[in-house]
Image: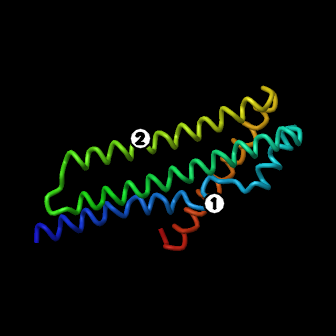
């Protein structure tokens, strides 16, 4: 019985990366290229600047996609290590380090993209972009809050 409970806990923990990935899936925090280009135009960027930024974004997106796949595979490997009859603590901790390093690499890639984009624009354009994206973020936040309120009302809470 104890082994069964342990396996269930490990199985549930093993699904957490999938649940997290579902939250960060398509549409979550990602703007379609058409909207990105329009925001860049609204901030006063030239067509050449927009093309340069889209190249930077595409390269970073490809790199981040590869890293996310590596993270996913490393998490699957860790699940296998955790499900072993006699889990090897050193191997599991090594896998945790590997996953942490990949997530750090992902974060650095995202930050690097932002810094590269910032080099492509003037300080005034950057300020305009910051305001535009902050407004979009606030709008999205308001929409999420409204959906939560609507769900609560449906449930009668």
Query: Which is closer to the viewer, label 1 or label 2?
Result: 2
Left of 63 or right of it: where is 90? Answer: left
Image quadrant assignment for residue 43:
top right
Spatial CA span between label 1 and label 2 = 26 Å
Find numbered disc 2 in the image and state the secondary structure of the residue it sits on: helix
- The residue identified by callout 2 is 101
Q: Label 1: few (<14), some or many (≥20) within 10 Å? A: few
Find numbered disc 1 in the image and state the secondary structure of the residue it sits on: loop
Screen quadrant of the N terminus: bottom left
Q: Position of residue 151 (x, y in %)?
A: 54, 68
Q: Position of residue 53 (x, y in %)?
A: 76, 41
Left of 117 or right of it: where is 105? Answer: left
Q: Classify 53 as above or below 87.
A: above
Image quadrant assignment for residue 41:
top right
**Label annotation for residue 27:** 1
Q: Nearer the viewer, residue 37 or 137?
A: 37
Residue under the point 61% across and 60% down: 146
Q: Position of residue 156 (x, y in %)?
A: 49, 72
Extreme residue toward the left, this view: 1
Left of 2 or right of it: where is 96? Answer: right
Residue under the point 28% across and 61% down: 80
Q: Nearer the viewer, residue 15 or 49?
A: 49
Q: Position of residue 149 (x, y in %)?
A: 56, 62
């Amino acid at each position: 019985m104890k082994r069964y409970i342990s396996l269930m806990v490990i199985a549930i923990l093993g699904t957490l990366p999938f649940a997290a990935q579902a939250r960060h899936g398509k549409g979550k925090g990602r703007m379609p290229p058409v909207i990105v280009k329009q925001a860049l135009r609204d901030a006063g960027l030239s067509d050449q600047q927009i093309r340069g930024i889209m190249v930077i974004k595409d390269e970073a997106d490809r790199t981040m996609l590869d890293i996310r796949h590596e993270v996913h595979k490393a998490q699957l490997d860790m699940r296998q290590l955790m499900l072993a009859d006699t889990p090897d603590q050193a191997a599991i901790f090594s896998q945790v380090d590997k996953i942490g390093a990949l997530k750090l690499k992902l974060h650095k890639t995202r930050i690097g993209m932002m810094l590269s984009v910032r080099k492509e624009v003037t300080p005034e354009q950057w300020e305009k972009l910051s305001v535009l994206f902050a407004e979009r973020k606030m709008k999205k936040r308001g929409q999420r809050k409204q959906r939560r309120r609507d769900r609560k009302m449906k449930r009668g809470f």
